[in-house]
Image (spheres, coloured by chain):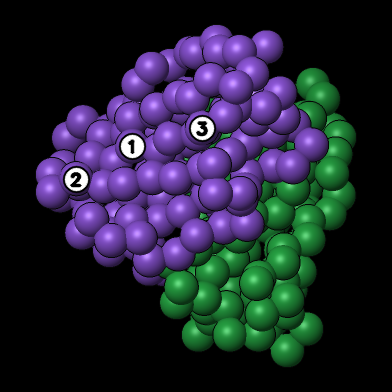
Amino acid sequence: GENVEQHPSTLSVQEGDSAVIKCTYSDSASNYFPWYKQELGKRPQLIIDIRSNVGEKKDQRIAVTLNKTAKHFSLHITETQPEDSAVYFCAASFSDYKLSFGAGTTVTVRA
Amino acid sequence: KAGVTQTPRYLIKTRGQQVTLSCSPISGHRSVSWYQQTPGQGLQFLFEYFSETQRNKGNFPGRFSGRQFSNSRSEMNVSTLELGDSALYLCASSFRGEGETQYFGPGTRLLVL
């Protein structure tokens, strides 16, 4: 089955700086890569996703890059703000109706 | 449009008991997935249902089962509860379940004593 590894497990950044989270996946057939944000005590919510036919996608301060050859994808958050503090999960899926999640990255933005 | 709902929100059970959790997807969504979330293991896939059929199952023992009804509502059951089953159980819904945004419910927090 699909195995997704996520690094780092914790990340502390100064407000205004950038944050980068990296994930690798094992199944080269994976074609859908979403990122979820989970604030304390709340449900995970999709923040951005990318498909295997696209190398990069951007939405305001958030961007995701995908390297299919190396089987890794990354989340980039620029100009971090206190409200960006949360746990971020990457995930990958092939056409098997199953999302495999990384273990999560706890991001803390210091004021 | 109402979001995904789950009932109950909290449950306390003792070892050996069984439990049934319910998930109502967003109206029009036919795919429902279940996940177990624990601090050490993150989000682990349990199973996915579409049109009352289980299309995939994660690596969990047979004590974990589920079903989906004709209105797309889904239930999961855990029999013979163990202490290690204590977790947040999340369900998520989408239209077709393949390569789409999954919308999560608030979860059911299960504590097994």
The chain ID associated with circle 1 is B
| Mark 1: few/some/many CA within 10 Å (<14, 14-19, 20+) | many
Sequence-wise first label, 1 or 2: 2
Question: Which residue does the numbered mark 2 point to in the structure image?
Answer: B69
Secondary structure beneath label 1 = strand
Give the camera-side residue of B9 and A18: B9
- State if disc 2 and disc 1 touch (CB < 8 Å): yes
Question: Which residue does the numbered mark 3 point to in the structure image?
Answer: B79
Please give the count of numbered marks on the rendered protein.
3
Q: Quadrant of residue B7?
A: top left
- Residue at 62 percent across and 36 percent down: it is B37
For the residue marked with disc 1, what is the amino acid?
Glu
The chain ID associated with circle 2 is B
Q: In which quarter of the image is residue A92?
A: bottom right
| Mark 3: few/some/many CA within 10 Å (<14, 14-19, 20+) | some
Give the camera-side residue of B67 and A110: B67
The C terminus of chain B appears in which quarter of the rendering?
top right
Question: Which residue does the numbered mark 1 point to in the structure image?
Answer: B75
Same chain for the residues at labels 1 and 2, yes or no?
yes
- Say if A90 sits above or below B20 in the image: below
Sequence-wise first label, 2 or 3: 2
Q: Residue B110 at what x, y percent from top left?
A: 56, 20
Q: Residue A60 at what x, y percent from top left?
A: 52, 51
